[in-house]
Amino acid sequence: MKNKIEKIYADASADIAKAAATSDLEEIKNKYLSRGGEFNAIKKGLKDLSDEDKRTVGALANEITQKLEAALAAKHDEFYAKELDEKLITEKLDITMPGKFSAEGRIHPITNTINEITAIFESLGFSVVANELSPEVDTEYYNFDALNIPFEHPARDVQDTFYTAAEGGRQVLRSHTSGSQVRAMEAKKPPIKVISPGRVYRNETVNSRKNNFFHQIEGLLVDKDITFGDLKGVLNEFVYAYFGMPKAGAAGVGLREQGEQGSIVSVRPTRFRNSFFPFTEPSAEVDVQCIMCAGAGCRTCSGTGWLEILGAGMVHPNVLKGVDIDPDVYSGFAFGMGVERLAMLKYAIDDIRLFFQNDVRFLKQF
Ligand code: PHE
């Protein structure tokens, strides 16, 4: 038995002397010292020896094991240091190399414009209606009937509105966000002060100014004693905030100070023109003085000096009655604006289709 141990020690020592790398040492350790290794086989045989032999042979086995482990450890330290040095030389990291750039994502200009407009109205005390109050596929009731739009109104024609087959009859791809006024008034009693942004669809021939879907932001305020003056005040505030803040010191004064000629950050006057919508009475279309030419007349404003930016009016009594709000007690105003149009005016974009083609060269500019 002792001889066997001495023999293993000699073999293992010779192997260690021949080893050239840490990986060789691993192999040697496995061969001699692991559970299935040669030494363990010897140790298992100890139980068959006399007590006397068990002690001496056992002590020898332990001594040899320790010697081998020490020899392996010493070699390991030596090889490891050497291998690390080699690695440091061959696997050098060049920190001056340019990194790999990944394209930066950004928010779509339409989303951006919606966020910006929403923030302005939130600062005026409006809140955004819940998604379920603003469905894109809606019934004719919400898109037309509840808004006092008569059955024979041309907007209902398939020339203008997309219809779709749905459970429980035909429905429309909403042609405006005004249906959300009705849902908002059904959901809550006055005071109501909401805005509702979303996508709308119209059966248009697509060109640089018209797309068959676009975005609108609807606004509605219903309370006691609401007048057309309130409507004007709120929309003027919006125009000032969106097209440019008044210069320092000019806040709160009439039309506020005007910026430099042609500057699109300057404050412009607004104009409320008499108009007609079935769901508001009286109705108005709101123009802002042309942001390009400051009213002088140019291509953007077709020489008029004004840009139409939204439709608005006092909520029609029939609409209020339809949602059980007494028009003798409450009154309100509503407005609706096209997001693409407002973005095109602000950023001087001359083709609405650019928003939907997703050409990164266009999108990168925002
Ligand atoms: N819904 C109208 C449109 O799409 C805009 C509007 C909204 C007008 C609210 C008045 C009041 O043209």
Image: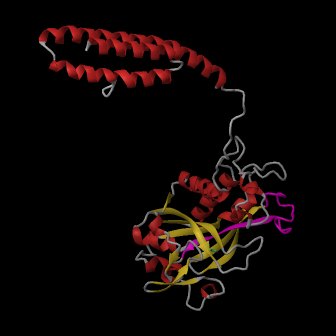
Of the pair 299 and 275, the residue shown nearer to us:
299
Q: Is residue 82 left or right of residue 322?
A: right
- Identified at 26% across, 20% down, the residue is 42
Residue at point 64%, 49% (across, down): 105
**Residue 78 horizontal/vertical position (percent):** 51, 12
| Residue 198 percent location from the top left of the image | 57, 66
Magenta region, main secondary structure: loop
Q: Is residue 165 visible?
A: yes
Image: 216 above or below 201: above
Quarter location, residue 215: bottom right
User: Is residue 305 rendered magenta in the image?
Assistant: yes
**Residue 61 image point, x, y percent:** 27, 12
- 116 part of magenta stretch: no
Of residues 156 and 224, the one drawn nearer to the viewer in this rendering: 156
Q: Over which residues does the magenta segment extend?
A: 290-315
Residue at 58% x, 81% y: name it: 278
Q: What's the residue at 53%, 16% (across, down)?
A: 79
